[in-house]
Amino acid sequence: MNQELTKKLAPGHTTCAGCGIPVIVRTILGATKDPVIVSNATGCLEVTTTIYPYTAWKIPYIHSAFENAAATISGVEAAQKALLKKAKLKKSAKGGSAFGGKAKLVVFGGDGGTYDIGLQSLSGALERGHEFLYVCYDNGGYMNTGGQRSGGTPLGANTETEPAGLDSFGKSRNRKDLMEIVKSHGIKYLAQANVAYPNDLAMKAKKALETKGPSFLLVLQPCTNLWKFPTSRYVRLGRLATETNFWPLYEIEKGNYVINYVNKNPKKVEEFLKEQGRFKHLFEEKNKKVIKEIQKSVNGNWKKLVEMSGSK
Amino acid sequence: MTNKIYKVKAMTGGTAAAEFLRQAEPDVMAVYPITPQTPIVETFAKMKANGKVLTEIIQVESEHSAMSAAIGASAGGVRSVTATSSQGLALMHEMLYIASGLRLPVFMYVSARALSAPINIHGEHGDVMGSRDAGWIQIFSENAQEVYDNSFIAMKLSERVKIPAMVIMDGFHTSHTVERMNVQDDKTTKKFLGDYKPEKSLFDFKDPTSFGFLALQNSYFDFKIEQAEAFKEALAEYKKITSEFKITFGKSYDYFEKYKLEGAEYAIVIAGSASGTAKEAVDKLRSQGKKVGLLKIKLFRPFPYDNLAQALKSMKGIAVLDRAISLGAYPPIYSDVVNALRSADCGLPVSSYIYGLGGSDILQDEIENVFEDLIKWKFSKEIKYLK
């Protein structure tokens, strides 16, 4: 494997075949040459990289719990400030520094750990203005525990805790607009990205890591196991999410919206849905209205985004 | 050489805690308000605002995040502290186990208070008793002076054995009551505490550490046994540190305080601020020629079973007064005392009393009556309520 890529997260982790999480981590962490410290919420990335006595992390790493990765990094950031202060004090006293450079602080959490259980600690850390990058890899559910519904699960998806059945078409609500929630904290840089567009992701990671104060990336991560599609279709499926405008690529920089990928003729959302087992039931006659509703919501969101970005 | 440069000051338990923190000057403090702990974080925040400490303060949005941030900072290899009470301690319950499991010496004050429901903001030990299996060193304080003194012992012990520590004061009775106390000089206190030198730190980029592993069936048990061993070590280290404390500050502290136990036939075991009232009761009955004494719990986790049994085994009968209720079971200190005696093959009769829940008063008369019950050999298996 490419040694440059695996400098921070080594091979030998145990993510599922066809999982894009390591790609997300490596792409983002590859966007800086500075030392990096990672805080990780409980979830797929955590359980697959730190099975005792092994660790796939070649950089300092901390996992403490599910809902508190942002609070944990707040403490790390405060420790860094304290150490920098001491180093400065020592430097002025003895002409030498006990503490080297400043590290980039990066959090990785899934959608369960971010949209749901970790939203409060994320909000607190954003409001306090700690300098860190929070990355939410969004696979649309609690995949580490077998595919339960989260606040990030899209409308109509069949999940273990809101399954499709005689009286149910699966998830009955649209997912939260996490980008708008994060944006409302007034942070300088946030962006929505997709693992199927690694160059775009790398560009955004670089900007996020250079931001003074908090920054945020919401990255789509198609889950082969629980979206139920063959691993060979992984990149294709990720791209379909963006080509249908289901998952637009955009940035919000100092409040300004920039769309990074504009479709002249966006594909119908059906193209994205039909590839996945989790939406299979929507193609039954009784559920077809849900597809229409999803398309309506995709169109509405896109229109709003275009308006916000001031483009046409 | 014993330090004699101390100042006499009027302080509450809360301000005594903040005064210790000013002298210890931790690198990071996570701050979140809750009655009756708030005076600690408020006093400290003012010290910071006036440039008296360099400490980085994080104004977190909950106690869960307070402990999470304290853990993050401690993993960063710096001295990290926080303070809480009651619902706050309950909210951070999950994180207490993670601080101890990661072997991080986080330091915390708890202004002990009742738990909801019904909501009640007053003193009792129900909150800290709920944390007694969380892998923390727990030290009870009788008054502001002990809050201050115990802090030195707890912080040093915690860092030496890599177990987080909580110094406990009674909500309001200690946290908000002004007392006369001695404050040591800054230089001596800083020297006593020394610099914190972590074994591992997130800021070590040459030899990076992963904190917070997934340990499966083949290793989790071993992690817990290691923690249990560390608690044994803590019991021994506590002795050493109290000796160091005596050398530096000229005061003797033991695992517990023995008050007129010598020659006593009947004893009360109690923890926290009500010990003062109980001592008054002992004095009065002693003056009447009654052979009574008191054992005040200080170090509660690890629990000094052997020493406690040795101190009590020559009594004729004992009463344990708990300021906590363990619904459906005997209360916590009672259970530990009975265990201590049993493991020393001592079959003394022991009565259980519960007092002061939700800040309700305990009067000297009531404690005298407990002694009278012991003397009249009125023992029973029933838990009695002093209210």
Image (cartoon, coloured by chain):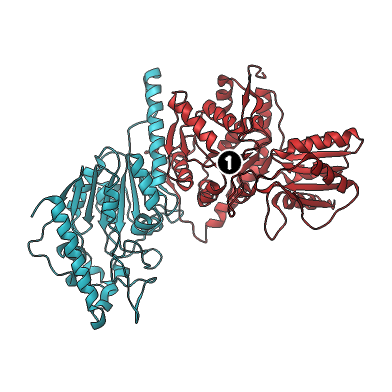
Chain colours: A cyan, B red
Q: Is residue B52 visible?
A: yes
Quarter of image, res A306 = bottom left
Numbered disc 1: secondary structure: strand
Measured as percent of width and height from the top left, residue B304 is found at 71, 43
Left or right of B319 in this view: A246 = left
Residue lying at 22% horizontally and 76% vertically, measured from the top left: A289
On the rendered structure, is A131 left or right of B337? left
Where residue A72 sits: x, y (%)? 42, 45
Report the residue at 21% width, 49% height from top: A202
Dot 1, crowdedness within 10 Å: few (<14), some or many (≥20)?
A: many
- As drawn, B51 above or below A272: above
| Quadrant in which residue B171 is drawn | top right
Residue A39 showing in the rendered view: no
Amino acid carrying mark 1 in the image: Val
Pointer 1 chain: B
Tell me: residue B357, above or below residue B13: below
In terms of depth relative to the viewer, which is nearer, B197 or A174? A174
Could you tell me how many numbered marks the image carries?
1
Left or right side of A118 for B127: right
- Which residue is depicted at the point 64% across and 32% down? B177
Q: Which residue is mark 1?
A: B110
Residue A93, percent from left and from top: 40, 18
Q: Quadrant of the N terminus of chain B?
A: top right
Question: Which residue is at 87% across, 45% downward?
Answer: B372
Q: Position of residue A4 (x, y in %)?
A: 25, 47
Q: Is residue B178 above or below residue A2?
A: above
